[in-house]
Image (cartoon, coloured by chain):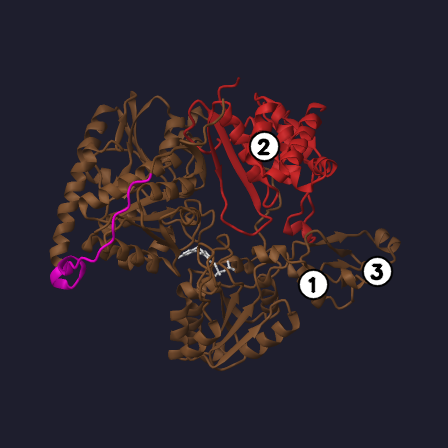
Amino acid sequence: MKPSGNILFSGVGGQGILLASEITAYALLNSGYDAKKSEVHGMAQRGGSVVAHLRYGPRVYSPLIEPGTADIQVAFEMMEAARYLPFLNQDSVVVVNTQRILPPAVATGKVAYPDNLMAEFENRGIKVIGIDAFDLAKQVGNLRTANVAMVGAMSCFVDLDTEVFLHVIETKVKEQFRDINKKAFLAGHEAAQAK
Amino acid sequence: MTFDGKDKLWLSGNEAIARGAWEAGVSVASGYPGTPSTEIMEYLSSYEGVYTEWAPNEKVGLEVAIGASFAGVRAFATMKHVGMNVAADPLFTAAYTGIRGGLVILTADDPEMHSSQNEQDNRNYAFAAKMPMIEPSDPSEAKEMLALAFELSEENDTPVLFRITTRVAHVKGVVDTAEARERQEASIEKMPAKFVMLPGNARVRRAEIEKRMAALKQKAETLVENRIEQGSAKRGFITAGVSYNYVKEAFPDASILKLGMVWPLPEKKIKEFAASVDELFVVEELDPFLENHIKAMGIACTGKELIPSQGELNSFIVKKSIEPQSIGKVYEPIDLPMRPPNMCAGCPHRGIFYGLSRMKDVFVSGDIGCYTLGFLPPLSAMDSCVCMGASVTVAHGMSKALGEKGKGKIVGILGDSTFMHSGITGLVNSVYNENYTTIIIVDNRTTAMTGHQPNPASGSTIKGEAAHSLNFEKLCTAIGVKHITVVNPHDIDATRKVLKDEVARDEVSVIISRAPCVLLPEEIRRQKPVYFTDLENCTGCQACIRLGCPAISWNPLTPEEALARGYKEKQKGHAMINEAQCVGCGQCAAVCKFEAITLKEEN
Ligand SMILES: Cc1ncc(C[n+]2csc(CCOP(=O)(O)OP(=O)(O)O)c2C)c(N)n1
């Protein structure tokens, strides 16, 4: 097992990033790691850029990932993947939900949504896995599980048992949503494995 | 292996502090919301046996805690850093009275201003108010050190300041739990010489402060929370709070003096530590607080010459500042459109700011809350914002400076919680010293910005129990405001008319713009109509786009595409409502002149 690592979650407020990072954190804790997670919240408004830093290892001090040291980035939106490029390095893996959510300046027609953002990673030799998490969630039958599908996709790149994640979903997710979230997780896992 | 959720918990700093307050046997806690402190009181309110409340402002909250302490029980006040400015009056004199039950005052500072209007360093309050200050580095320490803070308070007859920053409050980590300590029995004990701060008594108490701080300075020398981690003698670091973590990661082999109590400082220990290393660095966020005091001891050290005094630190910045040659290249950020937080779809604030955005020569003296987002394009309808309550008073000051020239041009706007926090006294002044401003209270029935805390007008307490709901109309009448109008901000035409009429007045007027926040649970549950864009009728005039609603987007068209859709060739595009996001407020339908936005049920 890797002794320590850094996982960066990014996306747009309201996409369920906090739950996704919580599930991942518990999976790490259950596997015997120390962990720290940092997130900035406090604005009730939806739609702002959101980021969470998750670090694990035998003993974690700093709650913040250093630029250039994220092992994995889980991005819930294309542009919010590219925004955190300085945190990545050549060996990073980016798991990105290919959905596009228009920020105000784009929605009001002031600027265009940047195209071909995937190339920003590929041109730098960074491994990038595009996942249509929205579609996966639709297939399992609940649009709100897109975030857990992303965790499933990400789980292919951390050295943890799939079982550990499923156990966390079993213990941390409300009963009525457990099964559907497990399905979403597995769908995401398979989709990433197929790439 | 399963992470044990019983004696070990995965908690945020704020959750850990709530737990710590409960374990420490706190009986009474009062606070006013403010990022990054808010969740402490929310979590604490779910524990049995602790009285918790939302106060209307931080001064009230601190005074409540002082009162509980005078009654002999442990008391806790929480606030964000700028809240301490509001509470500074009782704060400074509480140092004189000292305490009966342990009193801890928490300040949550926000380096980098993630959600604040300034990044003041409240360690300076410890020095200025002559109180000890404890500063933890992470959630686990936050819980442990809160117990220490209460002990120090009771042992030394002093309020104790407890400082956290965003990266402690909103960081999650593993925390050990303990049993709750028994709560003290409250009682009345009259101690006028200690509690009545008239000059004669205060002079006596003033001398007590000096004695107590001298004793605490001694205590600081042996406190285990002020610990030396002996490493290589080449470099030594003095650090505290979250910065300790960054030093640990940037220079794992170095010697560190970690201060858990940042005021008063252990001079002997610092001198010994300084003598034990070749080169001494002080690493701290924001002000050179430790550094200046260490330099004043006659100790040579390097601090803000290298370490930034603005914004947050992290291990990368610490390394780069001290050992720039060891830093590799990192990718440059890509230039991307910003994604600022936005007023929600259906936000009632939008209606009133839309009206103001159409009144170009009016100066809008703003305030702090979700409605500050009215500053952002496309509404761009806020011209100043200083601190909570300042909307009313800045408007008054402007009107006095402008005289006749400002008539019909000065508006103040503030939220319901902000009005009760510190807008009321300003309005009293506006009436008493007669001006012609219009004050708009955007009453969404909650403290939305910080996550929907109930307030004195919401009709419920922190625990969700029913409470009296303050009546703004009657209050404003009692203050002497003669023109009070209530308007539904979703009614765009009525709102614009009210704005026009009231702003034109020669006397103080108040507009209460009333509609609930769309994120309130009962609003989320409510069945709402949905609007949709009738594309045939859309002329691409962009009137709806100018509302800045996140549920409406602009779909650009080339001339060929426009023609193909049956539009005029020169039509640049059309608007689109995202029906999944629409909550049916109807503001866009009201501004559309071409019947291109219609209620879904009507079709
Ligand atoms: C002195 C001070 N205390 C607390 C805060 C944090 N804060 C910012 S806005 C706000 C309340 C906003 O509530 P309200 O006025 O009702 O407006 P809303 O967000 O609901 O639109 C709070 C508590 C602050 N900025 N300054």
Closer mark to the observer between disc 2 and disc 3? 2
Q: Is residue B433 visible?
A: no
| Amino acid on which disc 3 is placed | Glu
Determine which of the numbered discs, if any, sits on residue B440 in the image: none
Q: Tell me residue B257's x, y (percent).
A: 28, 30
Indicate the chain on which mark 2 is placed: A
* In magenta stretch: residue B58: no
Report the front residue among B85 and B118.
B85
Q: Secondary structure at mark 2?
A: helix
Among the chains pictured, the one given red colouring is A
Region of the chain picked out in magenta, as a range? B180-202
| Amino acid on which disc 1 is placed | Cys
For label 3, the crowd category at 10 Å Cα-Cα, with few meaning under 14, some 14 to 19 and many 20 or more, is: few
Q: Secondary structure at mark 3?
A: loop
Report the front residue among A46 and A141.
A141
Disc 2 and disc 3 in contact, CB within 8 angstroms? no
Q: Colour of chain B?
A: brown
Q: Compute the Cα span from label 2 to label 1.
A: 41 Å
Q: Are marks 3 and 1 on the same chain?
A: yes
Q: Compute the Cα span from label 2 to label 3.
A: 47 Å
Q: Tell me residue B152's x, y (percent).
A: 23, 42
Q: Compute the Cα span from label 3 to label 1.
A: 17 Å
Q: Secondary structure at mark 1?
A: helix
Looking at the picture, does residue B150 appear above or below residue B519? above
Which residue is disc 3 drawn over?
B536
* In magenta stretch: residue B200: yes
Determine which of the numbered discs, if any, sits on residue B588 in the image: 1
Q: Residue at x 70, y 26 (%)?
A: A190
| Amino acid on which disc 2 is placed | Ile
Q: Tell me residue A194's x, y (percent).
A: 72, 23
Determine which of the numbered discs, if any, sits on residue A169 in the image: 2
